[in-house]
Image (spheres, rainbow, N blue to C red):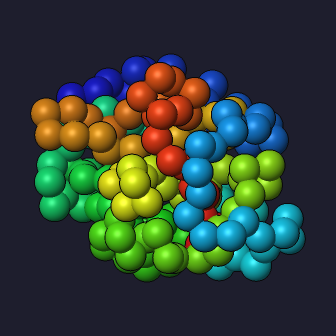
Amino acid sequence: MRSANTIVFWVAPLALVALAGCGTPQSPRGSLGSPERMDLPSRLTADQAGDVTIYAIGLVGTPYRYGGNTPQSGFDCSGLIGHVYQTRARVAAPRTVAKLSGWGNAVATENVRSGDLVLFSQRDVVTHAGIYVGSGRFVHAPSTGGEVRLDSLGSNYWAAQQIAFRRP
């Protein structure tokens, strides 16, 4: 169980980074769908996207559980995304990564903002998803035995994947 001081230690600085305008992530090695122009329509306001980001960061440390979709039961990757978007923006996200790959609009890497989805694929099949939080980082529920965590798109493992961004 995480203490309140631990959460504040991690969330406060990360929230400031997420809200500070963020940097551009590493260039993706592939894309799903055609990236759109900068002024993409979105179901989320900028404030909602910020809320999604801060809330997702606050869930770091929650246990992974296949099929999980609440902080109490744990999360898998699409369960985490669905919970965060529903709780903070009242937007229902698809429940599988396959359906998330067609949700919203494709976003070019140079136009990505915090609160957008980041999708990972191998051989053009989407295998994983997370929530982009800025500065080339994302929150996700990675695998059995793990926990929700903050990772870098530039790490060796994630940079080797095809990466695409979508804006709900």
Q: Nearer the viewer, residue 42 or 160?
A: 160
Q: Is residue 65 above or below residue 58?
A: below
Q: Among all residues in the image, which is located at the extreme front?
A: 123
Q: Is residue 4 left or right of residue 25?
A: left
Residue 82 at what x, y percent from top left? 38, 67
Residue 161 at what x, y percent from top left? 46, 41
Residue 72: tell me if it is visible.
Answer: no
Q: Is residue 5 left or right of residue 27?
A: left
Q: Is residue 147 left or right of residue 154?
A: left
Q: In this view, does 42 lie above or below 30?
A: below
Q: Which of 91 and 8 is in front in this view?
A: 91
Residue 130 at what x, y percent from top left? 45, 50
Question: Residue at the location (80% across, 49% down)?
Answer: 110
Question: Residue at the location (52% across, 40% down)?
Answer: 138
What is the count of numbered marks?
Answer: 0
Question: Residue at the location (72% across, 50% down)?
Answer: 109
The N terminus: image quadrant: top left
Q: Quadrant of residue 117?
A: bottom right
Q: Nearer the viewer, residue 148 or 105?
A: 105
Residue 89: tell me if it is visible.
Answer: yes
Question: Residue at the location (51% across, 76% down)?
Answer: 103
Q: In this view, does 27 lie to the left or right of 54?
A: right
The C terminus: image quadrant: bottom right
Q: Is residue 57 above or below residue 104?
A: above
Residue 6 at what x, y percent from top left? 40, 21
